[in-house]
Amino acid sequence: MSGLLEAQTCEGVLNASPSIGIEKRCSKCKGTKKICDFYSWSGNRCKDCINIWSRVYWKNHAAAASRHRKKYYTQNRDITLARHKEYYSRNPEAHRGRCQAWANANPERES
């Protein structure tokens, strides 16, 4: 059935058959990869290349990102606290689990 769409899922994405482009070439690494190895918004860069770029970018801009987060929190403190309070009230088991995991990983800091 060349040239027709087939329902092949690759992480939930509907892909075209191989004859009409199930593969795509990354403009960064020049590799040919399955279409599901690309984010829908990423243009012609594969997920691997975008993830590598992202890690390097945020490592090099950690101070700026930290300043931005602090500024946002300061300007939106009440909204942020209300959002967190609502999340904790709706997800008590998840919150308790994270607290317990932190306590197990940091026994010297436990009160």
Image (cartoon, rainbow, N blue to C red):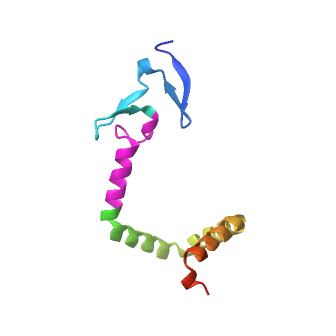
80 to the left or right of 64? right
**In the image, is residue 104 part of the stretch drawn in magenta?**
no
Give the total number of marks visible in the rendering.
Answer: 0
Question: Can you give x and y, in whole percent of width and height, for residue 32 in the image?
Answer: 34, 31
Q: Outermost residue toward the bottom? A: 111
- The residue drawn where x is 62% and y is 73% is 99
Question: Can you give x and y, in whole percent of width and height, for residue 24 in the image?
Answer: 37, 30
Magenta span of residues: 36-58
Question: Can you give x and y, in whole percent of width and height, for residue 56 in the image?
Answer: 32, 58
- The residue drawn where x is 57% and y is 81% is 107
- The residue drawn where x is 34% and y is 37% is 44
Residue 69 in which image quadrant: bottom left
Residue 22 in which image quadrant: top left
Question: Can you give x and y, in whole percent of width and height, for residue 17 in the image?
Answer: 48, 21
Q: Is residue 9 above or below residue 2?
A: below
Q: Quadrant of the C terminus?
A: bottom right
Query: In this orientation, which residue lies closer to the viewer: 19 or 43?
Result: 19
